[in-house]
Image: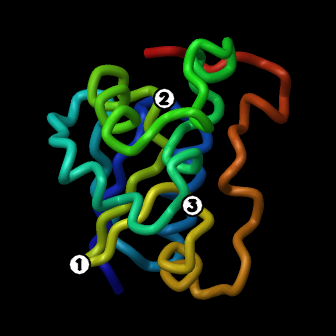
Amino acid sequence: MATIIFYQKPGCVTNARQMQALKVAGHDVIAKDILKERWGAEELRRFFDNMPIVSWFNRAAPRIKSGEVNPGAIDAPSALALMLRDPLLIRRPLIDVGSARCAGFDHELVLSLLGRKTQDDLERCSYERTGTRCPQT
């Protein structure tokens, strides 16, 4: 099995469910705080590979939900600069396993780690489904 570095927002119920799914699949998961990590633009960019820029963003982030940040109108350097200043904008989780990286829980890398073709609804924010608010810290 694999050792997975899992960048999460502590207290995020969805991230906790995702980590549990990886552990149940037999992987060692090392959780790191995405908000406290000292990111460099190049390092962060590697998690997004060929994803469209709009997909780099956490759609549940307060600044996106309020309309202050429009991911559809931002180029790559500007997106990275925004995320470095406000890590809540980064799509979670960021996953680093071996030489592979990805952002989000709906990628082939994650599905292969889980040993299935599709994942249960582990990508969607748990708070969105219940209509409650996620703690911002």
Task: State the separation of the CA atoms marked 3 and 2.
Answer: 17 Å
User: Which quadrant of the rendered structure holds the C terminus?
Assistant: top left
Task: State the separation of the CA atoms marked 3 and 1.
Answer: 17 Å
Depth check, mark 1 against mark 2: the one in front is 1
Instruction: State yes or no: discs 3 and 2 in contact (Cβ < 8 Å).
Output: no
Instruction: State yes or no: discs 3 and 1 in contact (Cβ < 8 Å).
Output: no
Task: State the separation of the CA atoms marked 1 and 2.
Answer: 27 Å
Q: Residues within 10 Å of mark 2 (few under 14, many from 20)?
A: few
Q: Secondary structure at mark 1?
A: loop
- Using the image, determine if residue 135 lies above or below residue 108: above
Q: Read off the residue under disc 1.
A: 99
For image coordinates 64% across by 29% down, the residue present is 60
Amino acid marked by disc 2? Gly
Q: Secondary structure at mark 3?
A: loop
As drawn, is 62 to the left or to the right of 9? Answer: right
Depth check, mark 3 against mark 2: the one in front is 3
Instruction: Using the image, tell me which numbered label, if any, was put on residue 105.
Output: 3
As drawn, is 127 to the left or to the right of 33? Answer: right
| Mark positioned earlier in the residue sequence (3 or 2) | 2
Q: Read off the residue under disc 2.
A: 11
| Mark positioned earlier in the residue sequence (3 or 1) | 1
- Using the image, determine if residue 42 lies above or below residue 74: below
